Image (cartoon, rainbow, N blue to C red):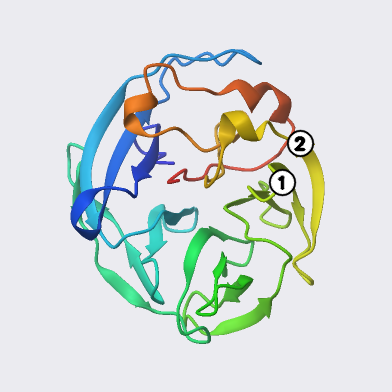
Amino acid sequence: MDITRNRLIYDDDAAAGGTNQAYAISLNNIQLTPHAATPVTVTSLGSWVGSGNNSGWRKADNQFYYFVDGTTQLHTLTFGPTGLITGDPLVGNFTGPTAMTGGDIDFDSNGSIWVSGTNSSGEPRLWNFDFGTLDAISTLSPNSLYNGMTFNAEGTTLYGYTDTNGEYGSINLSTGAFQSVLQTDPAFFGGGGDLATGTEEIVLPAVPEPNQLGIFGLIFVGCLFRFRRGRGVVAG
């Protein structure tokens, strides 16, 4: 979520050349109706280096972070005066795992980074890293990959989505265990995805690829009004 420009940022990780093509949806004057689609305008923002859709917004510095699929590299994005991407500088490398693939990023109340993904053996993991050192604080082994994650407004409760069974739910930060809250329709959402929130404490599911965005399917938004959080990033 780009709070400066009040827009939702997401990416197409199928772009050519090992890059992610980024897009934005303006949230100005959008009225969301439960169980109905909402037409939106999509704007291309350019691309960033590194295949993968593993990204999140950090409230403390209003920055957008992501890790490069298949590596441990953490990057941030920079934007020019018109809102287009101008760079993707390397922040550093996470220490602990040797490779991370898929999943998502979000930040808790103390600023540490939570990262979901699979390790070098293809096993689902949930890592917690110190933001300053990028050292692993904990490594949890959930039963399935959390494709998308988002904290509540206080940064204390973590919610996730898993396409293994198409469910949204809460994630235990001590064990990585999943508690289902909502069963989605896999025929509509399919695989992959991400989570983020808007100004009215709304959790947004993953958006379709750009060629599917004549109508932006926010059908499940009405079911999720009470998931509480500040603002986040969709990049799935």
Quadrant of the rendered image containing residue 189: top right
**Of residues 29 and 23, the one drawn nearer to the viewer in this rendering:** 23
- Numbered mark located on residue 15 in the image: none
Mark 2, Cα crowd under 10 Å, few <14 / some 14-19 / many 20+, is: few
Query: Measured from the top left, where is residue 27 in percent x and y?
Result: 42, 24
**Quadrant that contains the N terminus:** top left
**Relative to 33, 30 lies left or right:** left
Q: Which residue is mark 1?
A: 165
- Tags 1 and 2 touching, CB below 8 Å: yes
Q: Which residue is mark 2?
A: 183
Q: Amino acid at mark 1?
A: Asn
Q: Is residue 202 visible?
A: no
**Of residues 188 and 148, the one drawn nearer to the viewer in this rendering:** 188
**Of residues 93 and 145, the one drawn nearer to the viewer in this rendering:** 145
Q: What is the residue that sits farthest to the front in this orientation?
A: 187
The residue drawn where x is 38% and y is 25% is 212
Mark 1, Cα crowd under 10 Å, few <14 / some 14-19 / many 20+, is: some
In this view, 44 is above or below 58: above
The residue drawn where x is 32% and y is 60% is 51
Query: Measured from the top left, where is residue 176 in percent x and y?
Result: 74, 67
**Relative to 34, 55 lies left or right:** left
Query: Measured from the top left, where is residue 172 in percent x and y?
Result: 78, 62
Q: Amino acid at mark 2?
A: Gln
The residue drawn where x is 21% and y is 51% is 16
Number of numbered discs on residues: 2
Q: CA distance from mark 1 to mark 2?
A: 8 Å
In this view, 30 is above or below 1: above
Q: Earlier in the sequence, mark 1 or mark 2?
A: 1
| Secondary element at tag 2 | strand
**Of residues 21 and 155, the one drawn nearer to the viewer in this rendering:** 21
Q: Of discs 1 and 2, which sits in the foreground?
A: 1
